[in-house]
Image (cartoon, rainbow, N blue to C red):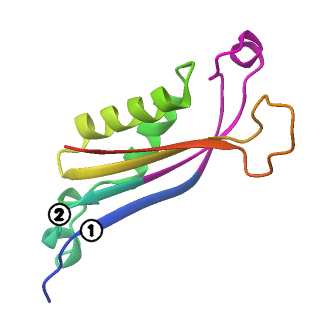
Amino acid sequence: MNVKQTIIRLDGMRFYARHGVLPQERCVGGHYTVSLRLVVGPCPGAVGADRLEATVNYAEAYALVRSVMAEPSALLERVAGRILEAVFRAFPLVDEATAVVRKDTPPISGDIAGGASVEVTAVR
């Protein structure tokens, strides 16, 4: 078997945070959903030999996202960017990463069932 790449996904991580442009968003806060997609090399040590150190520990990735979400930013784009910056610092095996940050109930006048989100992809 010749493994081409490994993709690690953390989907639907839920957080309460204080991101937003409006002062009320920073004061009151709101619910956010974050998904992370990490593209790493073939990871033969993980795929073929069951070694955690040969891949990205998704519990550590979750903790990293949680810590970034705890620090307020005005824009969701910046939140996603900070998540990706932290991923590349913490996990040298990651070649490409995508962060999707969704504000579950954005402060807009209208019904928006799926919230408002940004998706940012970066490569090392």
| 16 falls in the magenta region | yes
Q: Describe the element under mark 2 as helix, strand or loop.
A: loop
**Residue 40's x, y, as percent?**
23, 59
Q: Describe the element under mark 1 as helix, strand or loop.
A: strand
- The residue that appears at 86% across and 44% down in the rendered structure is 111
What residue did someone put label 1 on?
6
**Which stretch did the figure color magenta?**
13-36
| 112 falls in the magenta region | no
Quadrant in the picture for residue 76: top right
Q: Nearer the viewer, residue 113 or 93?
A: 113
Q: Nearer the viewer, residue 122 or 87?
A: 122
Please say if the residues under marks 2 and 1 sit with CB atoms less than 8 Å apart: yes
What residue did someone put label 2 on?
41
Task: Look at label 2 and name its amino acid.
Answer: Gly
Q: Residues within 10 Å of mark 2 (few under 14, many from 20)?
A: some
How far apart in space, not on screen, are marks 2 and 1 (Cα)?
A: 6 Å
Quadrant in the picture for residue 84: top left
Quadrant in the picture for residue 115: top right
**Residue 86's x, y, as percent?**
33, 33
Q: Nearer the viewer, residue 56 or 21?
A: 21
